[in-house]
Amino acid sequence: MAEKFENQPEEKQQQILNAAFQEFGEHGYHKASTNRIVEAAGIGKGMLFYYFKSKKKLFDYVLSYAFQIIEGYTEQIDMSIPDVIARYEEASRIKMKTYLQHTEIFHFFGNLLLNFQEDLPEEWQKKIGDLQIEMKKRMFSGIDYSLFRKDIDPETALKLIFWSIEGFERELLAQLRGVNFEETPLDPIWDSFFHYLEALRKAYYEERGH
């Protein structure tokens, strides 16, 4: 698809990709500027089009690249775990690890879906919709509903657990933004997260062993 680009050194590829992620994420496809992309990437405009031929081909490439990363995260979620909170715990570990490795991709994808979904070609809207269905399936298929308290509707409990964990993740990611992870111990952060999950178990599960 972009063989000339992929033959470049990894560092140069990442500079160009990161510049494209930021530009398309902030402005969408139609208002994105290839001038700003090449300025941020530190390359000439002619070189960008030598690699990708057009703005549309560049957009398709970064979409495909980002989609593969998000899809890879989704495929790692273990559907054999019957405890939904334990499944969320594992999924959050994978998500956080992927986020820390590919922060710019999560920002790009999130901004694109929230603010510029109309810029996405129909085929990509379908792919993303299918991925969201698969992610929901991986999170909720095969859940052991007997773990929930009998006085709470299981579907309501699932929604409350989902909203709680998503909210905690957003708060955590906001705290971690701009942090140097090589110098920051992450154990206290995970301890806080596990404490939060235990609070959810006490709130929504029967008092038997988990």
Image: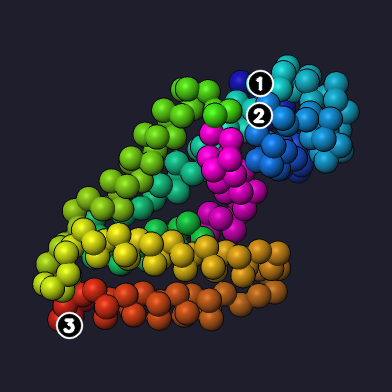
Q: Secondary structure at mark 3?
A: loop
In the figure, residue 60 lies in which quadrant? top right
Work out which quarter of the rendered image holds the N terminus and state it.
top right
Q: In whole angstroms, how far apart are the C-alphas of marks 2 and 3?
A: 51 Å
Residue at x 54% of width, y 68% of height: 171
Q: Amino acid at mark 1?
A: Lys
Mark with earlier residue (2, 1): 2
Mark with earlier residue (2, 3): 2
Q: Are marks 2 and 1 in contact (CB under 8 Å)?
A: yes
Q: Nearer the viewer, mark 2 or mark 3?
A: 2
In the figure, residue 108 lies in which quadrant? top right
The 10 Å Cα crowd at callout 2, few under 14, some 14 to 19, many 20 or more, is some
Query: Where is residue 27 drawn, in percent x and y?
Result: 69, 37
Residue 207 is tagged as 3
Q: In whole angstroms, how far apart are the C-alphas of marks 2 and 1?
A: 8 Å
Q: Amino acid at mark 2?
A: Tyr
Query: Where is residue 114 drawn, in percent x and y?
Result: 54, 43
What color scheme is it?
rainbow
Judge from the rendering whether residue 174 lies leftward or rightward of residue 153; answer left or right: right
Residue that badge 1 annotates: 56
Q: Is residue 92 above or below residue 32?
A: below
Q: Secondary structure at mark 1?
A: helix
Query: Where is residue 150 drawn, in percent x and y?
Result: 11, 72
Residue at x 45% of width, y 75% of height: 193
Tell which residue pokes out farthest to the top in this image. 53
Judge from the rendering whether residue 110 lies leftward or rightward of residue 198; answer left or right: right
Q: Amino acid at mark 3?
A: Glu
Report the span colored magenta: 97-117
The 10 Å Cα crowd at callout 1, few under 14, some 14 to 19, many 20 or more, is few
